Image (cartoon, helix red, strand yellow):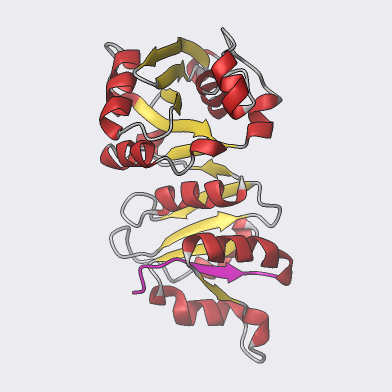
Amino acid sequence: MNPAPAIWLVRAHGEELAAVLQAGLNAEVYRPWLQEGVSHKAQFAQIYRRHAQWIVIGATGIAVRFLDGLTADKHTDPAVVVLDEAGRFAISLLAGHEGGANALAYKVARAVGATPVVTTATEALKPLVVGIGCRKGVPAERIEAAVRHALGQRGIEEVREMATVDLKANEPGLLEFCSRHELPLRVFARATLAARPWVSVPSDWVRSNVGLDGVCEPCALVASPRGALLVPKTCLDGVAVAVVEDKWMEI
């Protein structure tokens, strides 16, 4: 199977999203309406196992019907992520862990500004979200030290996801840290964070360099809307960290 993701367009309405994903993920795009005389479901069945990862742009129900009769087991099934045509949600539908659909959902979400949706039990039971901001060029070791310092007695294995601002989406040290611990990185647009200025103590430096009063606290709180601030902004060696704990059991 080709390890690069493939994009299945249910309708031409998804062309703009497909173009963004194709450029960002080096993905191949399939347009089934171009092949006349063969149903879209039959076309998908013919090439389903040609790629290790699929992004279906359309409704979840359509993806489920297309997958009927094709799945075998979690160790061999290609990953499937569904992205709605409005670009709102990137849903890890099939092969979340073994196939990499969970990680792909976050990649898709970062590319188009969507919300990643992951429902596998391992992630659902992790209660912590870590918001992070850092100076440019900060190495992974300093990021790890700051995160562990903020977590205190809590462990990295309790962290569901990291969250940061779009300006830091490709920060090498942050990406290395996330990869090292298999932590997904959630990225928020500055406009999203500016509309939710949940900051304990505004930072003049962040305001002048990023255009926001703060990064780590609003990132963590936006990523976990049911959560409460467990650790407010704490700084160490050029890295700012905030920790939010999901309070779903108390709702």
The reply to whether the magenta stretch includes residue 60 is no
Residue at the spot 48% in from the left edge and 78% down from the top edge: 45
Residue 12 screen position, x and y as percent:
72, 71
Q: Quadrant of the C terminus?
A: top right
Q: Which residue lies furthest to the right in this view?
A: 13
Quadrant housing residue 2? bottom left
Task: Name the side, left or right, on which 106 lies relative to 225.
Answer: left
Looking at the image, residue 186 lies above or below residue 78: above
Residue at the spot 66% in from the left edge and 51% down from the top edge: 87
The reply to whether the magenta stretch includes residue 10 is yes
Residue 127 screen position, x and y as percent:
41, 23
Q: Which residue lies furthest to the bottom in this view?
A: 37
Task: Name the side, left or right, on which 45 lies relative to 239.
Answer: right
Looking at the image, residue 246 lies above or below residue 232: below
Q: Which residue lies furthest to the top in this view?
A: 201
Quadrant housing residue 137? top left
Asked if residue 226 shows in the view, the reply is no
Looking at the image, residue 130 lies above or below residue 96: above
Magenta range: 1-11
So how many labels did they put on this image?
0
Quadrant housing residue 123? top left
Residue at the spot 68% in from the left edge and 81% down from the top edge: 33
Task: Name the side, left or right, on which 181 lies relative to 222.
Answer: left
Looking at the image, residue 101 lies above or below residue 78: above
Residue 160 screen position, x and y as percent:
40, 31
